[in-house]
Amino acid sequence: MESIKRFLGLVKTPTQLVDRMHFEFRVMDGEETTEKPRKILRRFTQMRDYLIGAHTKTPNLAKCEELASATIETHLTLKVLEHFTKLDLEERKMYVTVFSILVTNDYGKFATVYMMSAEGAQILKLILDGYGNSQIALNCGIMIRECIKQRCIHEYLLDNSDLIEPLFTVYAHSPTFEISSDAFSTIQTLMRRNKQLVSKKMNANGPLYGRVFGWFNNMINSKEYVTRRMALQLLNEFLLDKVNFDIMIAYVGDVKNLMGIMTVLRTPQAIIQYEAFHVFKVFVANPDKTPEITLILQQNADKLISYLTNFLPERDNEQQFVEEKKLLINMLKKLKSQDDECILKQIGRASCRERV
């Protein structure tokens, strides 16, 4: 049956498919003319069918490799992304599927070699910039998350943080819920995928540590409710992961971070208070507090104890939450009883060590 279809021109080889795709784009750009109807969706569907083995029990690896190689050699991915806003919804969705399969399966070394090239860097930028266009933002979100799943691309993005900065500083703050939540899904993938890699890149002595937590602090203080809530949730999850222990110690040892979280605790929105509480408790529960952190908690102990005593009474039916509140209150009471002069001497000794 397939041989008959091929004879009639209904089934094309992977290389022919890619050639026909370029023809469709030349028609779109007015470089060629045809009386035939647009077949972009059909061509993308045929590409997908090759990659998933729609007409066979399993994909034909040789044809998958041929399709990937033809896509790479003719710069088809760039061409598609340059025309992405001109494609309709179904065409974009089908291409996202094709792109995701190429990246996930690394056919023709699409992910590990091609996407690491100069052209691959252009593609990554086009995809990330797609968040700036509501028409294609969600499609681009799917594609960049598939890329991040590949460790080599993930590492490239972390090493070139200017590319990902707008996710944290622009798109996560979008007043459009769909865009901000999708951008946050991508941020979460960036921070939680390949955990050992992220932990290594985020070490407190590296440049990425300060940049990322600076972006987090801005998100926590965003005027967008969804942004603040999701930022606090992700921050808490990230800090409490044991693989990030050293990062957590550095974060909770920074006075600016403590002051920022204490400010958020006083926000009028109960759910934001609740999420901030879970970050705040890490500062208080840390057994190795810096003298500076200890002093701030001690100086504010009375206010904090009073505040926590009547904190979110509507959640008093949640046993774990109630127990955590009691634990923090008891810890603050113990801090309150410590000698101020002793703490100031510790700060002085720490300052001397830093100067040395």
Image (cartoon, rainbow, N blue to C red):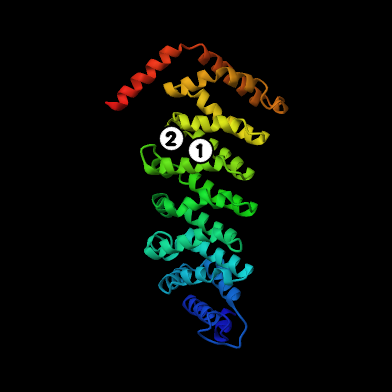
Q: Which residue is mark 1?
A: 238
Rounded to the nearest whole Å, what is the CA distance between mark 2 and mark 1?
9 Å
Residue 257, percent from left and from top: 49, 33
Reading the chain from its start, which is encountered first: label 2 or label 1? 1
Q: Which residue is mark 2?
A: 247
**Within the image, what quadrant is residue 245 found in?**
top left
Residue under the image location 47 percent in, 51 percent down: 165
**Within the image, what quadrant is residue 345 found in?**
top left
Return the mark for residue 80.
Answer: none
Amino acid at dot 1 = Phe
Can residue 238 be seen here? yes
Instruction: Assign the C terminus to one quadrant of the image.
Output: top left
Q: Residue furthest left?
A: 356
Find out whether the residues at labels 2 and 1 contact each other: C-beta distance under 8 Å.
Answer: yes
Q: Viewer-proximal residue, 87 or 71?
A: 87
What secondary structure is marked by label 1?
Answer: helix
Residue under the image location 52 percent in, 14 percent down: 336
> Few, some or many C-alpha atoms within 10 Å of disc 2 (few <14, some 14-19, many ≥20)?
many
Q: Viewer-proximal residue, 130 or 219?
A: 219
Can residue 149 be seen here? no
